[in-house]
Amino acid sequence: MQTATLQSGKSRNIRRILQIRYCMKEWIVSIVCVVILGILLEIVLPKSKMTKYIKGTFSLLVIFVIVSPLPKLFKQELKFDFSTAWDKVNSAVVQETESARDKEREDDLKAYLALWNYDCKVKIESKNAGLEIESVEIEIYGENADFDEVTGLVTNRLGVEKTQVKLIVRKERIEEAKI
């Protein structure tokens, strides 16, 4: 009877060791894959303002992959769905890219209209990850604004339809309170 108990204990220990080996193998493969993905990401990513945000997000993923086996060691299952996490990260990156592209276009259009002596504030709304401009709102300060000229300048510069451009003329600039 003692022999059966010892063999049962040994087989449990062997099973546990094999299970730990398998988990370690998966863990090492995951780390290697993430490192390779990081190297490829470094090569492919263009140098821009978004690079640091993408690298920061990727660093969090690396930390998660390294720490992921810890709950298994404490016999607790860590439930994490990579597909939903990837979707969230992807949508955040798309949104950040879209807002950065809009800001860049706004600054460019404001500078362009300044060359034509228009003091203005520009707001651009886009869709499809910033690839398509949905609307352009321009707030012009002063009374000498020529609607047709400004609309023509905007449509030529951004390649949008006249119906997508909204012009607002104000006599003077209203300063926004900063909190």
Image: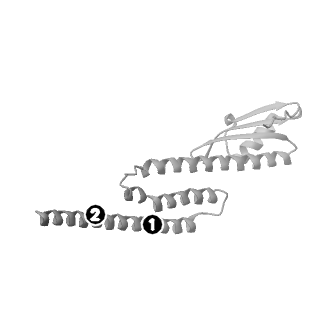
Look at label 1 and name its amino acid.
Ile
Residue 145 image offset from top left, x and y in percent: 85, 35
Instruction: Specify whether residue 130 is in view.
Output: no
- Comparing 23 with 90, the one in front is 23
Residue located at (48% from left, 69% from top)? 36
The C terminus - image quarter: top right
Instruction: Specify whether residue 53 is in view.
Output: yes
Residue farthest along the front direction in this orientation: 2
Q: How many marks?
A: 2
The N terminus - image quarter: bottom left
Indicate left or right for 118 with 42 as reference. right
Look at label 2 and name its amino acid.
Arg
In the rendered image of this protein, does residue 158 appear above or below residue 173?
below
Residue located at (54% from left, 64% from top)? 41
- The residue carrying pointer 2 sits among few (fewer than 14), some (14 to 19) or many (20 or more) residues within 10 Å by Cα, namely few
Indicate left or right for 118 with 39 as reference. right
Q: Which mark is residue 16?
A: 2
- Comparing 119 with 19, the one in front is 19
The answer to which of marks 1 and 2 sits earlier in the sequence is 2
Residue 103 image offset from top left, x and y in percent: 71, 47
Residue under pointer 1: 31
Residue located at (67% from left, 42% from top)? 160
In the rendered image of this protein, does residue 25 appear above or below residue 69?
below
Q: Looking at the rendering, which quadrant does residue 144 occupy?
A: top right
Q: Secondary structure at mark 2?
A: helix
Q: Looking at the rendering, which quadrant does residue 6 occupy?
A: bottom left
Report, in whole angstroms, how far the alpha carbon at label 1 lies from the one at label 2.
22 Å
In the rendered image of this protein, does residue 39 appear above or below residue 119?
below
- Comparing 86 with 144, the one in front is 86
Residue 177 image offset from top left, x and y in percent: 81, 34
Q: Secondary structure at mark 1?
A: helix
